[in-house]
Image: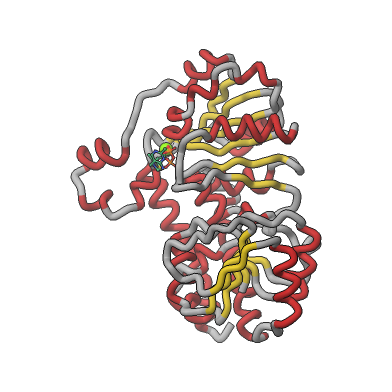
Amino acid sequence: MVVAGEGIADFDVASEWLGRLGWPIIADPRSGLRVLDDRLPHAPIISAADPILRSNVLQDRLRPDVILRIGEPPVSKVVNAWLAQSKATYIAVSRRPVVTDPDRVVTHSVTGPIEATLAAIGEVVGCPDEQWLASWVAAETIARTVIDESMSGAALHEAKVAHLLVDQLGDDTAFVVSSSMPVRDVEWFGGRRNDLRVLSNRGANGIDGVIATSIGVALGSREPVSVLIGDVALVHDSSSLVNIVDHAVDLHIVLIDNRGGGIFSFLPQAEALENDQFEKLFGTPHSTDFAALCKAHGIEYHEVDSEERLIEVSLRDGVRLSHVRTDRAQNVEIHRQLNDAVVSALEAAFSTGG
Ligand SMILES: Cc1ncc(C[n+]2csc(CCOP(=O)(O)OP(=O)(O)O)c2C)c(N)n1
Ligand SMILES: [Mg+2]
């Protein structure tokens, strides 16, 4: 199967060869391949690999013999752990002479133009097993249905904001996503669509410079930019707000404010430590007044607590900030429910011979 991170320069050439291969593609949002069938009709595109591979049944059923990874690895720990356990031949293709391989599982690495490498591979490999392919397609369809249905009508929570923005942002918007939860929520729950460019500073999961990056993207592309960012990352890069309104950029800052680092509530220390200790060492709450921060820099500020309001602010122009308040503990619970719903639906379908 193909695991596509960022790195494809020529979508038309890459998609032609990927279509000829016909292998399922785990399409990271940054790959530009998480598109609809009309753009890439001959290869199944998998958007929900993380929730799907939380099922042990599906982990076994969907195991590949060969992994062809384009560019950077996915963010998802679940997907990376599954790839590492697969014992498959693992070919990493990268434009840069650097192989990102934290799990030490890459068996072959190729540096060079990705499109030409795909063409060369496409000449020599065969079609995948039909039944295995059908299992991927069924799993993706079931997972997508559960996720999309769970999101509709739900109150505005973190995963829903990510899902909604992927769905609703205007064509040719650049969507910058920060660590830690935004990049994950977009990867785990964001659907497929055309004409959305997703960018993220990965590095070592750094939360620095995300606003600066967004301004750079807006100035460089002259396109509208939306940035999905957590409260700590925004506070960390608040000096980039200086003179932001003088840049004449169309920049929507969507702030998910869970008063600290949301990722840490998913980790074992959230249960192992007393709450006070956990908050001090990992949660790192703060009392920054974001309305005042916006006022200080001349940025339009909006309290946002509904889907309609978020879309409304999205449609404005200039530099504006949507302040969405969430709760870290509730966020863990919502993710658990979403993932459980996907896994239950998949296991019910696959146990009945699907
Ligand atoms: C420069 C830098 N400092 C610290 C960290 C460690 N770190 C990773 S995620 C995170 C918290 C991010 O919080 P927030 O921006 O509110 O996003 P959330 O986790 O709530 O989605 C921190 C401190 C990092 N990755 N990079
Ligand atoms: Mg946060």
Q: Is residue 13 visible?
A: yes
Query: In the rendered view, does 277 fall on the left or right side of 89?
Result: left
In this view, the residue in front, 297 or 92, is 92
Q: Quadrant of the C terminus?
A: bottom right
Query: In the rendered view, does 68 fall on the left or right side of 255?
Result: right
Q: How is the image coloured?
A: secondary structure
Q: Quadrant of the N terminus?
A: bottom right
Coordinates of residue 246 in the picture (x, y in percent): 66, 16
Q: Is residue 344 visible?
A: no
Coordinates of residue 353 in the picture (x, y in percent): 56, 86
**Image height check: is 275 above or below 187?**
above
Coordinates of residue 197 in the picture (x, y in percent): 69, 46
For the point 75% across and 63% down, which residue is it? 14
For the point 55% across and 79% down, which residue is it? 64
Q: Quadrant of ligand 2?
A: top left
Query: In the rendered view, does 271 fall on the left or right side of 75?
Result: left
For the point 61% across and 45% down, which residue is it? 199
**Image height check: is 282 above or below 151?**
above
**Image height check: is 19 above or below 34?**
below
Coordinates of residue 103 in the picture (x, y in percent): 42, 66
